[in-house]
Image: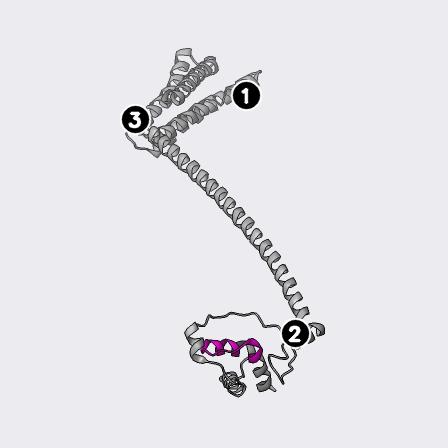
């Protein structure tokens, strides 16, 4: 890698020095002996080469000198100025101007080479950096794969939950519709005049003297009563049943509904048929 930056700088410097020497000899050779012109050209090239060598030694030591750098750029500018001045005195000025930038370009290449040397790393360091970068890429790829997998799993779970919820909702809707129709049929039967008269005529001999309007029982939670409680409670007379119903009904404020009263009545261990209990409730409520 070092040769890729130093060889172009060396080659450009050599071409610039040869070109500068040739131009000085051609330009000054007509005004003075050519050995003197060669000495002038070599002086320019020698000064440039000396400052360049000194800069390279300082760079190898990890040091830098601004005056030396300024002198080196001065020699480069002098060489460029000589080439431009010679080009302006020639008939084919364009061709000479096209190569007048070579000394500045050589100096710039040495600057690039110095920057590369200050930032260059060893092979071990480069391998370590590549390993770290590869490890980071691997971890990022694994993390992306894990996130994609978790997202797919969550999507599948949500889809399953949504479908199960939809099935439950459909079953609940069908059940509610069935219960609604059943309660509608029961209510129609309970409110029907013919049904009430028919059921009342059947129970006339069971409850003599009482002709209530027949109502079907209201569905609700029930608790079983033990046989011992039923036997110990015994049969209640109508007056005792009325008093007990009235007591339970007014045990709380506001008064309990029939269903709450009936639940507490049977929970207390009392025994009475649904017909007698509802008749007592109506007598007390009236």
Q: Position of residue 232 (x, y in %)?
A: 42, 79
Q: Do the residues bearing badges 3 and 1 touch, measured as CB atoms within 8 Å?
A: no
Residue at which label 1 appears: 88
Question: Which residue lies most toward the front here?
Answer: 205
Give the spatial CA distance, label 3 vs label 1: 37 Å
**Numbered disc in front, either 2 or 1:** 2
> Is residue 262 or residue 45 the one in the foreground?
262
Residue at 45 percent of width and 13 percent of height: 29
Element at badge 1?
helix
Label drawn at residue 199: 2
Q: Position of residue 4 (x, y in %)?
A: 40, 21
> Is residue 181 or residue 205 the one in the foreground?
205
Magenta span: helix, strand or loop, mainly? helix
Q: Answer left or right for 101 relative to 170.
A: left
Give the spatial CA distance, label 3 vs label 2: 125 Å
The quadrant of the image that shows the C terminus is bottom right
Label drawn at residue 57: 3
**Numbered disc in front, either 3 or 2:** 2
Element at badge 3?
helix
Local crowd size for mark 3, using a 10 Å CA cut-off: few (<14), some (14–19), many (≥20): few
Q: Position of residue 147 (x, y in %)?
A: 46, 42
Q: Does 2 appear above or below 261?
A: above
Q: Is residue 276 magenta?
A: yes
Q: Quadrant of residue 182?
A: bottom right
The quadrant of the image that shows the N terminus is top left
């Amino acid at each position: 890698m070092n040769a890729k930056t130093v060889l172009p700088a060396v080659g450009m410097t050599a071409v610039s020095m040869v070109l500068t020497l040739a131009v000085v000899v051609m330009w000054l050779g007509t005004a003075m002996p050519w050995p003197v012109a060669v000495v002038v050209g070599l002086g320019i090239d020698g000064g440039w080469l000396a400052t360049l060598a000194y800069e390279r030694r300082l760079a190898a030591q990890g040091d830098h000198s601004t005056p030396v750098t300024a002198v080196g750029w001065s020699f480069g500018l002098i060489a460029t100025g000589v080439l431009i001045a010679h080009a302006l005195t020639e008939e084919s000025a364009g061709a000479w101007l096209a190569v007048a930038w070579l000394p500045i370009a050589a100096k710039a290449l040495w600057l690039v080479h110095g920057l590369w040397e200050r930032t260059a790393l060893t092979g071990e360091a480069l391998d370590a950096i590549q390993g770290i970068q590869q490890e980071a890429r691997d971890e990022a790829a694994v993390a992306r794969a894990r996130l994609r997998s978790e997202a797919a799993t969550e999507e599948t779970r949500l889809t399953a939950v949504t479908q199960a919820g939809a099935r439950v909702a459909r079953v609940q809707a069908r059940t509610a519709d069935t219960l609604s129709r059943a309660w509608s049929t029961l209510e129609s039967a309970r409110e029907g005049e013919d049904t009430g008269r028919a059921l009342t005529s059947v129970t006339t001999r069971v409850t003599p003297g009482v002709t209530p309007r027949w109502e079907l029982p209201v569905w609700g939670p029930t608790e079983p009563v033990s046989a011992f409680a039923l036997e110990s409670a015994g049969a209640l007379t109508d007056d005792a049943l009325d008093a007990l119903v009235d007591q339970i009904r007014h045990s709380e404020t506001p008064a309990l509904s029939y269903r709450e009263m009936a639940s507490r009545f049977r929970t207390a261990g009392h025994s009475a048929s649904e017909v007698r209990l509802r008749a007592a409730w109506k007598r007390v409520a009236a």
